[in-house]
Image: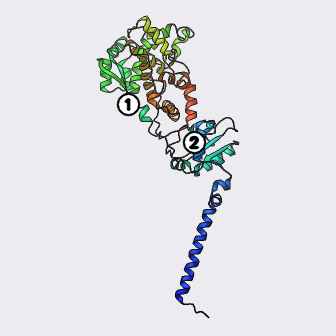
Amino acid sequence: MKKFTRKSIQQARMVVVLTGLVLFGFFIGARQDMIKKILSPASVAGVKSVDPKKLTQMLKQKNFTLINVHTPYEGEIAKTDTFIPYSEMVANSTSLPSDKNALVVLYCKTGRMSEEAVQAVEKLGYTNVMHLAGGMDAWQKQGGQLLDLSKIDAEVLPAEGVELPIAWGDLGPKLVNLGVIDLAKFKETVKPTPEQEKLLTQGGDAKIVIDRNNSQFVLDVLWALGLAQKSLAYSEGPMGKDYAKDVGNFASTGGWPLARGQAVDYLNRYELIPLTPQQQSKVAEIAKNVYRPCCGNSTWFPDCNHGMAALALIELLVSAEVDDATIYRKVLGVNSIWFSQNYLAVATYFARQGTPWNQVDAKMVLGADYSSAKGAGEIMKKVGPLPNQPKSAGGCGA
């Protein structure tokens, strides 16, 4: 009988171990898909998924709703429709499609959050919901790119502000001397800086620059100017036709508290901005296409402070013979400072469609579909929340 030495026993054991590892490796390779299914929570929960390659094809002829559910925000896939944190799907159910049979695709960074979100959406009654397997990580590994919109505020609200191709000139002293601005009331309410007070008392030739720090001052001075300046909007527009008897009851007229006496006494009274009849007509044409998110009316019907201020801004730009495209671009820039959250949402909406903010059609964006209270609200609802959204400049009051 052959004797087994300690060395031979150890060698035999090693052979067995190596053979076992080889067989186990073969089993793992051959049964990889099965093991993934066993270990995958998605499979256990019955969550439908789509891989990056398939999603790429689907996006070429997009006919579904794509939602980023990852929190905190770490980028997104182009053509995303909205952003809803995975744990807030029920609270934000109004941002989901009205048709509960519509296809909805959710994604996050790795797939974990989107799996949970799918189940939450299905509990709301949606029947055709899936998620991106592996999330944005898998998307990038397959060569997909991500958009980073977390810094979009720098594009919409540049730190240097918006410079206008016009100056205040002597408009400040004129408004004060005429009584449209009561300097004591203005100083008490607005609290202008020494430099701003100088513009009201002495004027200035420097170009007007509006930013997040001086937006209230610029708004209030333009408001006073728009109130007093003679305009077709007050004779031919709704305030002169349909609401002539109530003209003093609007936020832009009766709501101006910083005049000497009654604000309505100054309405449509002075030619502070020289305009030819042709220029007045041009102002009217542009004003009819410029909306603001606080109201449902165009600047042709300036029933609030932002509308009246925008009217004055248009009048100043037209008087300086600025071309239409620049006027719309500058008004959009000013509007964006006054209503930052709304226009950050609009910028996000266009960025997801592949159009950067500096290439959007300013005239189109200032129209009712994007800039009226209703249009802006619908865009914000579609876009969902994004980080770094500063508060807007204020309401319709001084």
Q: Position of residue 93 (x, y in %)?
A: 63, 39
Left or right: where does residue 181 sit relative to residue 100? left
What residue type is disc 2 on?
Answer: Thr
Image quarter (top left, top right, bottom left or bottom right) of the N terminus: bottom right
Residue in the image at 39% along x and 23% along y: 218
Residue that carries the numbered disc 1 in the rendered image: 213
- Farthest residue, direction top: 277
Q: Nearer the viewer, residue 99 or 137?
A: 137
User: Which element carries disc 1, helix, strand or loop?
Assistant: loop
Q: Is residue 222 above or below residue 64?
A: above
Residue 259's quadrant in the figure?
A: top left
Question: What's the mark number on residue 391?
Answer: none
Q: Nearer the viewer, residue 321 or 146?
A: 146
Disc 1 and disc 2: Cα gap in Å? 43 Å
Left or right: where does residue 331 sit relative to residue 54? left
Q: Position of residue 271 (x, y in %)?
A: 39, 8
Residue that carries the numbered disc 2 in the rendered image: 56
What residue type is disc 1 on?
Answer: Asn
Residue in the image at 30% along x and 26% along y: 194
Left or right: where does residue 277 sit relative to residue 66? left
Of callouts 1 and 2, the N-terminal one: 2
Q: Nearer the viewer, residue 96 or 53?
A: 53
User: Which element carries disc 2, helix, strand or loop?
Assistant: helix
Mark 1 residue crowding within 10 angstroms, few (<14) / some (14–19) / many (20+): few
Nearest to the eye among marks 1 and 2: give it.
2
- Farthest residue, direction bottom: 1
Q: Is residue 248 above or below residue 76?
A: above
Residue 95 appears in the picture as rendered: yes
Q: Position of residue 284 (x, y in %)?
A: 48, 11
